[in-house]
Image: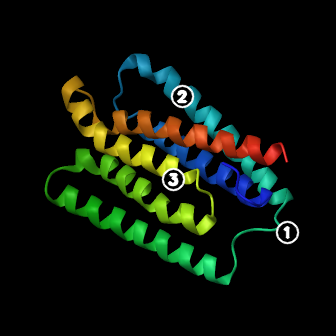
Amino acid sequence: MTPEHLRDAAGLAAVFGFFAMAWFGWAQEKPPASWLWPLRIGSILSGLTAIGGGLLLWRHWSDGTVFDGGTGAAFGIVVGIEFAAAGLGAGLLAWRGHAELISAWIAFVVGVHLFPVAVLLEIPAVHVTAALITAAAIAAVPIAKSKSLTVSAVVGALTGPILLVSAALSLIDALTR
């Protein structure tokens, strides 16, 4: 992922690892039985990656970072917009009787919000993660319908590995500096 600062690489590993674990968990809502062990293993590996990134982040907390007053404020605005869009869209989907699409909507919002995050954090590789998650969110619904699967199982099974690989690459980057 190669952010300029080790602390930022470690933080990315911690955050992406944590959310990969969450997506692997969401995928466990009525998946095919053959998916259970790979999803569980993905959850465990994601958790370990998050812990590794978190410990390294803690160890290098006083090191340099791309975050300053302006970056922090802009990041907060982007995340605030993400949460508002995710929450409003999820509420609207539930109200309209399409709660099964909430996971795809959340993944779509996450993917789209990572584009400005990549710019703010000055980590161009995050654009790849953003594009893959956005594509996974869009593809999940027709895939789920064509295979008679739950959307959450498909979107989680696609998004979890994307975030896990991104987290692992960030952790390797941080550890090899």
Say which label, 1 or 2, has the lower sequence index: 2
Say which label, 1 or 3, has the lower sequence index: 1
Horizontal side, residue 130 vs residue 49: left or right: left
Residue sitting farthest toward the top: 34
- Tag 1: Cα neighbours inside 10 Å, few (<14), some, or many (≥20)? few
Nearest to viewer (mark 1 / mark 3): 3
**Above or below: residue 33 compared with residue 99:** above
Horizontal side, residue 100 vs residue 119: left or right: left
Estimate the spatial distance between the alpha carbons at disc 1 and disc 3, rounded to whole Å: 27 Å
Residue under circle 1?
62
Q: Which mark is residue 40?
A: 2
Q: Nearer the viewer, residue 36 or 122?
A: 122
Estimate the spatial distance between the alpha carbons at disc 1 and disc 2, rounded to whole Å: 34 Å
User: Number of labelled discs?
Assistant: 3
Horizontal side, residue 176 vs residue 99: left or right: right
Q: Quadrant of residue 159?
A: top left
- The residue sitting at 43% across, 48% down in the picture is 131
Residue type, numbered disc 1:
Ser
Q: Quadrant of residue 34?
A: top left
Q: Position of residue 48 (x, y in %)?
A: 69, 38
Q: Position of residue 126 (x, y in %)?
A: 56, 52
Residue sitting farthest toward the left: 96
Q: Quadrant of residue 109?
A: bottom left
Please, what secondary structure does the residue beneath circle 3 have?
Answer: helix
- The residue sitting at 49% across, 77% down in the picture is 77
Horizontal side, residue 101 vs residue 9: left or right: left
